[in-house]
Image (cartoon, rainbow, N blue to C red):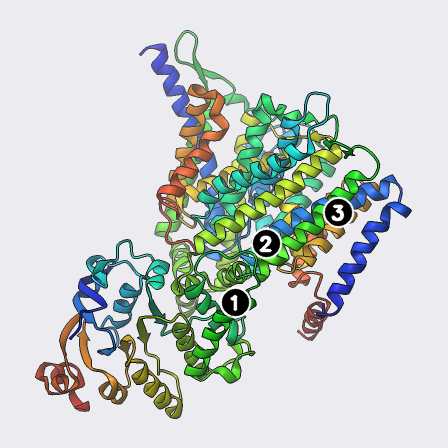
Amino acid sequence: MTDGTIFFLIQLLNAVQYGLLLFLVASGLTLIFGIMGIINLAHGSFYMIGAYLAFVFADMTGNLWLALAIAVPLSFLFGLVLETLLFRFLYGRDHLYQVLLTYGLILIFEELRSLIVGNDVHGVPVPHFLDFSIPLTATLSYPAYRLALSAICLAVTALLYLLIQKTKLGMAIRAGAFNREMVQTLGIDIGLIYRLVFALGVALAAFAGMLAAPTTSVFPGMGNQVLIICFVTVVIGGIGSIKGAFLGAMLIGLVDTFGAVYAPQFSGLLVYALMAAVLIWRPAGLFGAAAR
Amino acid sequence: MSARLRPALLGLGLIVLIALPLVAGKFGLDLAARIMIMAIFAMSLDLLVGFAGMVSLGHAAFFGVGAYALYLLSPQYGAASLLVSLPVAIAAAALAALVIGLLVLRSSGVYFIMVTLAFGEMFYYYATGARWLGGSDGAYVYQRPSAGPVDLGQGHAFYYLVLIALAATYALLRVILRAPFGHALRGIRSNEHRMRSLGFAAPRYKLLAFVIAGALAGLAGYFDAAQFGVVNPELFGWRLSGSVLMMVILGGMGTLDGAIIGAAVLVLLENFLGDLTTHWLLPMGLFIVAAVLLLPQGLTDPAALWRAMRERSRV
Amino acid sequence: MSEPILRAEALGKNFGGLAAVRDVSLDLSPKQIHAVIGPNGAGKTTLINLLSGDLTPTTGRVFFRGIEIEGHALDRIARLGVARAYQRTNIFAGFSVFENCRLAAQARRQPGIRLFRPALAYRDINDAAGRAMALAGVESRATDRASDLSHGEQRQLELAMALATEPQVLLLDEPLAGMGPEEASRIAALIARLGADLAILLVEHDMDAVFNIAATITVMVDGAVLASGTPQAIRADAAVQAAYLGEAA
């Protein structure tokens, strides 16, 4: 293979890795909307919180895996608490108030982050045994951690698929998305499902932040950047559709990565152009039902 | 507010604002001008959110276009012509709103919220990378615009022009809201499908509302750039879009007066809290969360607040 | 019979794999009441939705005064003069009864965007709204909120809104449902009177009313037309009796 082909393949790997990471965040956002009907602006904050948790615990324990083992359950718990204290009061309320409350939450999370860990940019070291690059040609190589990251994301995606397609909880989740009353007549506690789904969404976003931390560093405002791109993802894929979120995330990964290489002067704008094109072609997104 | 009380309060407010330069110092006038600029911005959004039911989270995009228009029309170290730059800024914002509106109005509801936010951020990211706009650091507007004897950098000219703009915006919105156009917008907010089945071309009404709101946001942005003498990408950003939405909702949407009150409360709060702590957004965030949980009707309807509290205490 | 004002040609509508309406052709003539009857689920409401533009047909065409309606945009069809009263009351719940009718009249008389003159200064619109309220019998509730009306009164308001658009074609989806017997017979008489000027498509379960006021009756079963003809012919039709009227006839 020529260097050009290898370079192309490297970009492809980057695009897939970005897309997979984005999917982990966007899937929670779309699940929470699809099932509970809640638009959550604070979803990007969970990504940010995950990244900072990884930073703090990796710093403390010196081991990213250990940090993950602590931080993932912690963020799931955090989701349970948030749902119980705040989000459950938003069900069925006007989207306007959901926007307002979750906007307030962003401010709170950002300020707390600033109070606790400050506004500096931090790096999170790559785990030692993955801290090498795989040489591909004389000049090109690929970092092992990024490959591992993609593999982990793929594994989580597969688990998510199994959870939703094959388990009883997944069936209830899917039924909840389509018919709330039916779930209740089946004798399933809808409140519990909502709580679990919300916490799952929080944990997924936080997990993505933790995985991304060693590759992107940890910085203020990282949550909001992700939130916007997640919205674009969900708009492209269709709100409430996991399949759509996956496709949207992959498309954005490709467009953003290859845009930065082949059309750097427009790179930031291409994903929005993609969204505009989808809006013109299919206003409800690629896999969306009619807009709610 | 009762039908008799409102005109009286409005008249009183206008007189106070006209007379303010007699008693207030520079700090007070700057603060009052800031409130009035934000009030114009908030009223423009109220037209969308409160009357047409279009919750835009990207309204700052047009504010930013107005602000950057003044920057681009100002000579390097000189003053822009007021008579040229003001209309051009408004027209530029209106044009941006037309283009964005044609795209975002293909969606509705929660899609609309997400799409407007995304397009607003598109402006932000573009500005951070665009050298002709000063990049992420922004750029200075060294002198306020002027036209013949009227120099916004001198005396109280800027303050009074902003006051005139505020009054004109208020009057214009009142007129179009009372006209068949405004009645149709309310109908669309209440039940868009029924409006269409009656024969209204609802998308055209919404697009025009979006353009008018964008133009007025551009007017506010123009004054913002003139007041502070600086533009930066934050003017397009979601934080400003969010805080103007906050003004509209906390003041009580769909009233115009509420948007003015909301703007005053938030600007004052920002000033007050900002003096106390650099982390003033924390109490602000807590305030917003508490407001959503406790006051579903906003702040301008004390009766509703009273009812809500009574009902809560009963539960 | 004069030239039809609204004509459906081989209309079909599928939802997923299910054919809700199959190959329905139908003519609406001016100054005539054309009733569509049939058991629940026969596709009557879907048919109205196809004619009004609420739904786009899967197959077939609709003509208004001989010109094909393409694109089937809801508001465009309404502006042609096709008004619709919904089966599930579809009003502006937070507005006054008058404002509900005034908006309907505005849609007819000022369909373009009017930005400056106060809405209430358009006398002709106010008058048209007033006439519609009087016809449908809701003028005494003019200043009340629509959501405060009883179910039957909301049905009357629904009809008043359709009338306020001063239509040429009126599509009525069970206008009598939910009304008390007195009000129902009053509205049935009103529909009969309106039939002297307008083309009316009437979907209704009240068989007495239908056979009294309709000039033509189409019977739908399972999304398709079973029979179509004068009330006498329909009453005598063996297939209709077997499939639908049965015990009633």
Q: Is residue A124 left or right of residue C19?
A: right
Which circle marks residue A162 in the picture? none
Say which label, 3 or 2, has the lower sequence index: 2
Name the residue located 53 percent from the left edge and 38 percent from the top edge.
B96
Task: Tell me the amino acid under the disc marked 2.
Answer: Leu
Q: Is residue B298 left or right of residue A141?
A: right
> Which residue, given by chain and number where applicable, does mark 2 sit on?
B47
Respond whether the residues carrying marks 1 and 3 are from the same subunit.
no
Tell which subunit mark 3 falls on: B
Tell which subunit mark 1 falls on: C
> Which residue, given by chain and number where applicable, does mark 1 sit on?
C122
Task: Indicate whether A141 appears above or below A90.
Answer: above
- Judge whether residue A180 can be spotted in this image: no
Q: How many discs appear?
A: 3
Comparing labels 3 and 2, the label whose residue is closer to the camera = 3
Coordinates of residue C105 in the picture (x, y in percent)? 44, 69
Indicate the quadrant where residue C238 lies: bottom left
Task: Indicate whether B221 appears above or below A269.
Answer: below
Coordinates of residue C153 in the picture (x, y in percent)? 45, 82
